[in-house]
Image: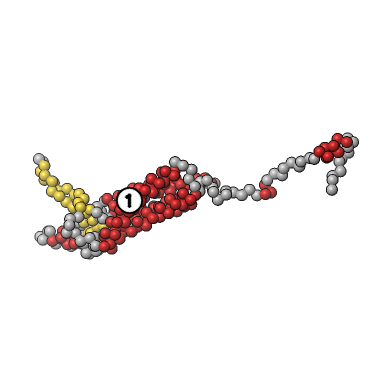
Amino acid sequence: MKQSMKDFLPIFSGFMAFSAFIITLFGASYCNFVTFCQTNPIVEEPAILHYGIWWYRGWVAVSDSNGSYIVESCFAYDGDTVIDSNWKAARAFNTLALIFGIVVGSWAICIGCTTPSKKMFQATGALYMLVCFFTGMSLLLLQSNACKANENVAVFEESFPLIDLTFQDTCSLGAGAKTTIAATVLWFVAAVASCMSDPNNEDGGDVVSSDRIAPADKEVSADEKVEEELAPAGEEVPEKV
C-alpha cells in the first residue's frame, strides 16, 4: 500500500502544478484583481470598479447600424496612472511566476519521459516552491496604489458630477486575487507531493525479517554420503561432533 501511494504522488503533484499554472495565468491576465464597491448606491445594485495587475475594467461606447451600446472590457493603464514600488514588484513577481511555471512544467514533462530518481523529484519540488513564492508575492498589489488611494477611482467619481458617487477607500479582493491565493496553495501542495515522491523506492523498501527467510537445505558432504551407504538398513547414522 505504501509503495502504491508513492507511485500516485508524481501524478498528483503534476496535476496540482498544472492547475496552479492555469489559475496563476488567469489571475495575472484578468482585469479583476481588486475591486472598489460603491458605498452610497442609488439603485439596488451598486457600481463596482475592477482593477488588475496589468489592466483595468472599463466601459466604451460602440456604435453600429442598430444603435449605440456600452461595452465592458479590459484596458491597459495609461501613462497618468501612478504605479508605485509595490505595484511594480507585484508585476515583476507575477511575470517570474508565469515564466518559471512554464520552465518547471517543461522540466516535469521531460523527467516523466525518463526513469526519474528521488533527487529529480526533490529538485522539481524545490522549483515548485520557488514558483509558489513568486505567485504569493504577486499579492503585493494589495499594498500598492492599486488598492490604497487609487487615483483612477477618484477620476471616475469626478467624471459624473451630477451623480453622488462614493466608493471604498480601500479595495476588496477580486476574482484575480482570490485565484492567486488558491494558486499559491496549489503550488505548495505540488511541491510537497513532489518532494515525497519516490516511485523507485530508493530508500531501500521494506526490509525482510531474517526469521521470515526459509533456511537453505543443509549440504551433505561426500563422507556423510559414504557413511549412509555403509550403515545397515534402518540404523541411524550418528552425527559428527
The amino acid beneath tag 1 is Leu
Residue occupying the point 20% across, 55% down? 77
Q: Residue at x 18, y 62 (%)?
A: 151
240 over 164 or under it: above or below: above
Which residue, given by chain and number where applicable, does mark 1 sit on? Answer: 98
Quadrant housing residue 217: top right
In this rendering, position of residue 143 left or right of residue 234: left
- Element class at badge 1: helix
The residue positioned 40% from the left and 55% from the top of the image is 129
Tell which residue pokes out farthest to the right in this image. Answer: 232
The quadrant where residue 90 appears:
bottom left
Left or right, 204 with reference to 88: right
In the displayed structure, 215 sits above or below 163; it is above
Q: Which residue: 22% across, 64% down?
A: 149
Residue 35 image offset from top left, x and y in percent = 24, 57
Nearest the viewer among 240 and 56 is 240
Binning the other alpha carbons within 10 Å of mark 1 as few (below 14), some (14 to 19) or many (20 upward) gives some
Q: Position of residue 121 (x, y in %)?
A: 46, 49
